[in-house]
């Protein structure tokens, strides 16, 4: 059975392994960036595990704006107790566990927590090939992002929580 929990510092090696399997070198978060997220925003960094195996994760800081900006990939602050916009900087599932609904379940877990903390929206950027996946989860496309992260074209996706 899949369980969801907040990240722990000792998860870093497994999280880094999944991150590098799922994203190109230019797009993947560095070990330092992931370590900072683990220590700064553990309240919005969740892992999925089964029988002690880390299957995937979702993370992102709560921000004041409706859309993600590239500076978030380097600098984040602790989350406010309530309000704001829950961003998603990373959603990744190990290739060994893909096509089992883990990514959708991680999004649902994050959404439930965001609603409890009265966040306004969940906001993320994705590549064009993933727009339909996020639309199936209730996200709306808000056009091309200003993000230059990883040198690719990103699309803003937003889900209103109120």
Image (cartoon, rainbow, N blue to C red):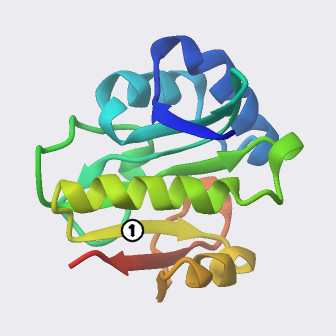
Residue 69 visible to an observer of this rendering: no
Q: Residue at x 88, y 41 (%)?
A: 96
Characterize the local packing of mark 1: few (<14), some (14-19) or many (20 or more) Cα atoms within 10 angstroms: many
In the picture, residue 52 is in which quadrant? top right
In this picture, residue 28 sits left or right of residue 139: right
Q: Is residue 68 left or right of residue 16?
A: left
In the rendered image, residue 94, in percent from the top left (x then y), is placed at 78, 41
Q: Which residue is mark 1?
A: 123
In-front residue for pair 100/127 = 100
Residue at 75 percent of width and 27 percent of height: 17
Q: Secondary structure at mark 1?
A: strand
Front residue (pair 20, 111)? 111
Position of the C terminus, as image quadrant, is bottom left
Q: Position of residue 156 (x, y in %)?
A: 47, 77
| Placement of 147 over or under 81, stated as above or below | below
Q: Quadrant of residue 21?
A: top right
The N terminus, quarter of image: top right
- Residue 81 in the image: above or below residue 83: above
Which percent across, then down, holds residue 120? 20, 71
Residue at screen point 46% across, 66% down: 124
Indicate the position of residue 104 as horizontal and vertical percent values: 61, 63
Which quadrant of the figure has residue 135?
A: bottom right
In the image, farthest residue toward the front: 1
Q: Residue at x 75, y 78 (%)?
A: 129
- Name the residue at the right extreme: 96
As displayed, is residue 86 above or below residue 53?
Answer: below
Front-most of residues 11 and 52 = 52
Taking the image as drawn, is residue 157 in sight? yes
């Amino acid at each position: 059975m899949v369980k969801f929990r907040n990240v722990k510092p000792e998860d870093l090696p497994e999280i880094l392994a999944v991150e590098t399997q799922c994203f190109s070198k230019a797009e993947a978060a560095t070990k330092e960036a992931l370590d900072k997220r683990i220590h700064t925003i553990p309240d919005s960094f969740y892992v999925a595990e089964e029988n002690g195996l880390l299957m995937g994760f979702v993370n992102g800081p709560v921000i004041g704006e409706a859309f993600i900006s590239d500076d978030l990939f380097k600098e984040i602050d602790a989350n406010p107790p309530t309000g704001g916009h829950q961003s998603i900087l990373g959603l990744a599932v190990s290739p060994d566990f893909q096509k089992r609904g883990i990514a959708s379940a991680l999004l649902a877990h994050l959404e439930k927590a965001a609603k409890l903390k009265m966040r306004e929206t969940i906001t993320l950027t994705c590549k064009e090939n993933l727009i339909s996946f996020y639309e199936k989860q209730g996200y709306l496309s808000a056009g091309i992002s200003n993000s230059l992260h990883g040198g690719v074209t990103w699309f803003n996706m937003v889900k209103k929580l109120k």
